[in-house]
Image: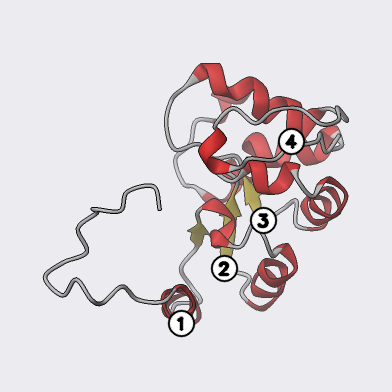
Amino acid sequence: MERPGRYYGDDTDFVPPFEELIAEQHAVFRKHPETTFINAHLGWMGNDLARLGRLLDELPNVYTEIGAVLAELGRQPHFAREWLIRYQDRVLFGKDSWNPEEYHVYFRVLETSDDYFDYYRPRHGLWKIYGLDLPDEVLRKIYYENALRIIPGLDETRFE
């Protein structure tokens, strides 16, 4: 555990199980079909993209993004590439923090077919990752076109 002393409230014996939290989140998505949700970090299902795909198939109001879970994609390059192509209209580029020195790894994973290279943040994965070599039209959607389509008020001239 990265932060074993993290505070969880007054009832320190209760930390909700992952599946319970995810079920509650998905219930909110279902309850509000007219609301667009961006389910961050591949919905915490980067290790089970097939399950995330079923959620996206069921709920057209849900989108996802790839911040902080790039290692999950880069360790399963063949399936992740197929998955991102299939769901190219539902995925956004995301990042938790402005760290320009990390972006080259995102671009390397998404844009190249490079093999077996280090991830930039060891605590997110101890394995080597691979490039997905996504087509340009998919990259454009992930990088900015999907955001322009679903987020009101974005200045599209910033992406020219």
Cα distance in 3D space between marks 3 and 1: 19 Å
Q: Vertically, is 8 above or below 85?
A: below
The residue tagged 4 is 128
Closer-to-camera residue (118/86): 118
Left or right: 3 as drawn, with respect to 86: left
Pointer 2 with pointer 1, Cβ within 8 A? no
The residue that label 1 is drawn on is: 27
In the rendered view, tell whether residue 150 sits above or below residue 8: above
The residues bearing labels 4 and 1 have C-alpha atoms spaced at a distance of 35 Å
Between disc 3 and disc 1, the foreground one is: 1
Where is the C terminus found, in terms of image quarters? top right
- The secondary structure type at the circle numbered 3 is loop
Q: How many marks?
A: 4
Q: Which mark is residue 90?
A: 3
Q: Are marks 3 and 2 in contact (CB under 8 Å)?
A: no
What residue is at 83 percent from the left and 38 percent from the top?
Answer: 132
Q: Earlier in the sequence, mark 3 or mark 1?
A: 1
